[in-house]
């Protein structure tokens, strides 16, 4: 094989490999887009909070579900929960250990971090580490079917 034939053959093979890669890497308009991924965490605990939740809104139905009992508000930075006594509480949603969103445990009125197992009471105090500091608590005022959560 002559040198020129080798270079032509090698160049053709490289061009074919490159076009195959580029073709498979491009997106087509007919391809379904992947679903949006949730944020990795709720973000830092906000110092100023002032928002409302409508209990009659279907988006907040889980709040009044006795088996679930909580929703996130303020862009996922606040968790609002309904206790076993029927009152509503709001705390910062980010675990103070590494920032994972805590979840409400309706039966015990505690909040738990699913990543490392930290537990917090209804006031936000640490019950079980590794978290060392409390969750920030917010004021909840109910007027009819509206909850106002503020710092």
Image: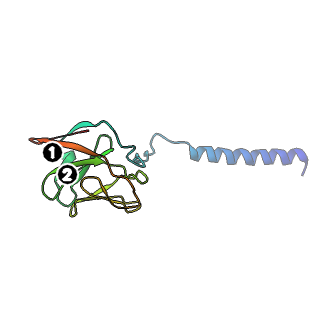
Residue 84 horizontal/vertical position (percent): 15, 59
Which residue: 39% across, 57% down?
A: 131
Residue 48 horizontal/vertical position (percent): 30, 36
Q: Are marks 2 and 1 in contact (CB under 8 Å)?
A: yes
Which residue: 71% across, 44% down?
A: 15
Q: CA distance from mark 2 to mark 1?
A: 8 Å
Q: Which residue is mark 1?
A: 55
Residue 128 horizontal/vertical position (percent): 35, 63
Judged from this view, the residue extending furthest toward the left is 144
Residue 75 horizontal/vertical position (percent): 32, 41
Comparing 2 with 62, the one in front is: 62
Viewed as shown, does residue 36 lie left or right of 6? left
Labels 2 and 1: the sequence-earlier one:
1
Comparing 77 with 10, the one in front is: 77
Viewed as shown, does residue 90 lie left or right of 93? left
Q: Which residue is mark 2?
A: 63
What crowding class fits label 1: few (fewer than 14 Cα within 10 Å), some (14-19), or many (20 or more)?
Answer: some
The answer to whether 83 is drawn above or below residue 76 in the figure is below
Q: Quadrant of residue 31?
A: top left
The answer to whether 29 is drawn above or below residue 134 in the figure is above
């Amino acid at each position: 094989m002559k040198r020129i034939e080798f270079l032509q053959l090698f160049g053709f093979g490289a061009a074919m490999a490159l076009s195959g890669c580029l073709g498979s890497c491009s997106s087509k308009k007919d391809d379904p887009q992947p679903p949006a991924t949730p944020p990795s965490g709720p973000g830092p605990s906000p110092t100023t909070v002032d928002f409302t939740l409508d209990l009659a809104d279907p988006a907040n139905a889980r709040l009044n579900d006795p088996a679930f009992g909580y929703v996130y508000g303020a862009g996922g930075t606040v968790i609002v929960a309904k206790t076993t006594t029927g009152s509503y509480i709001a705390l910062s949603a980010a675990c103070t250990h590494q920032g994972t969103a805590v979840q409400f445990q309706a039966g015990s009125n505690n909040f738990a971090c699913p990543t490392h197992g930290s537990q917090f009471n209804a006031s936000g105090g640490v019950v079980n580490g590794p978290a060392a500091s409390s969750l920030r608590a917010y004021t909840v005022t109910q007027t009819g079917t509206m909850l106002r959560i503020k710092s």
